[in-house]
Image: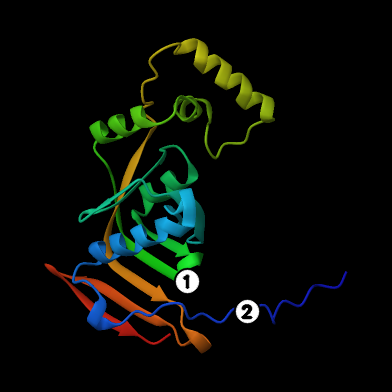
Amino acid sequence: MAKENIQGVRKDYGIGELVESNILENPIDQFELWFKDAAKTEGSEVNACVLSTLDENNYPEGRVVLLKFYADDGFTFYTNYQSNKAKQLASHPYASMTFYWKTKERQVRVKGKIEKVPAEISDAYFQERPEGSRIGAWASPQSQVIPNREFLEQRVKQIREKFPTDIPRPDFWGGYLLIPVEVEFWQGRSSRLHDRIVYSWNQDHWVSKRLAP
């Protein structure tokens, strides 16, 4: 069967620019500026990003996760500690996050070291989640092979019966903090001459540089 030629699919960017005179000294402050701007047009999944890790054979593996908190110390997301990504982070505690905001023609890449967040922080966030999400955390043996959809539905029923009122956080579920050492901001520009500015952590302060597109 003939394959479709998509070489001509392209878009010329040009709704914004990123110049040194306008960037903030701290990349987390710059991220916040862009994040809040994107939230106006990207909708409820403005916090979606691709989390990339390395598997046991050193193949890169990416999947979309939701950022749940950011501050000067890093970027927090939550998952099952028995999932594939958690196993990969246990053996190689480094990762990257990639955000893409189509409506703003912007991308942010963050890379750094991974640590688990304290249990009390995971406990507090877990109780903020909708009931269905809390039950789902218990019911899903994430990344494991299951026989069918009915298996999950039966697990949900069992969890509802086990925890009819208060649903505690399972000890196999919690948060991770990505502590950045490098943050790159990309602004689409015309003719593929994009703006790229990267911040690198240098012992006790951030240093920013412009990269060729």
Q: Amino acid at mark 2?
A: Arg
The answer to which of 108 and 90 lies nearer the viewer is: 108
Mark 1 and mark 2 in contact? Answer it, CB < 8 Å. Answer: no
Residue 65 position, x and y percent, is 46, 49
Please give the name of the residue rendered at 40% of the width and 38% of the height, measured from the top-left corner: 81
The answer to which of 7 and 92 lies nearer the viewer is: 7
Other residues around mark 1 within 10 Å, as few (<14) / some (14–19) / many (≥20): some
Residue 181 position, x and y percent, is 26, 65
Where does label 2 land, which residue? 10
Earlier in the chain: of badge 1 and badge 2, it is 2
Under circle 2, the secondary element is: loop
Please give the name of the residue rendered at 23% of the width and 63% of the height, measured from the top-left corner: 29
- Vertical relation: 171 (above or below) 154: below
- Vertical relation: 177 (above or below) 5: above
Res 205 label: none
**In the image, farthest residue toward the right:** 1
Please give the name of the residue rendered at 33% of the width and 53% of the height, measured from the top-left corner: 93
**What is the quadrant of the C terminus in the image?**
bottom left
Left or right relative to 12: residue 121: left
Residue 94: in sight, yes or no? yes
Please give the name of the residue rendered at 48% of the width and 52% of the height, measured from the top-left corner: 43
Q: Image quarter for residue 195?
A: bottom left
Other residues around mark 2 within 10 Å, as few (<14) / some (14–19) / many (≥20): few
Q: CA distance from mark 1 to mark 2?
A: 13 Å
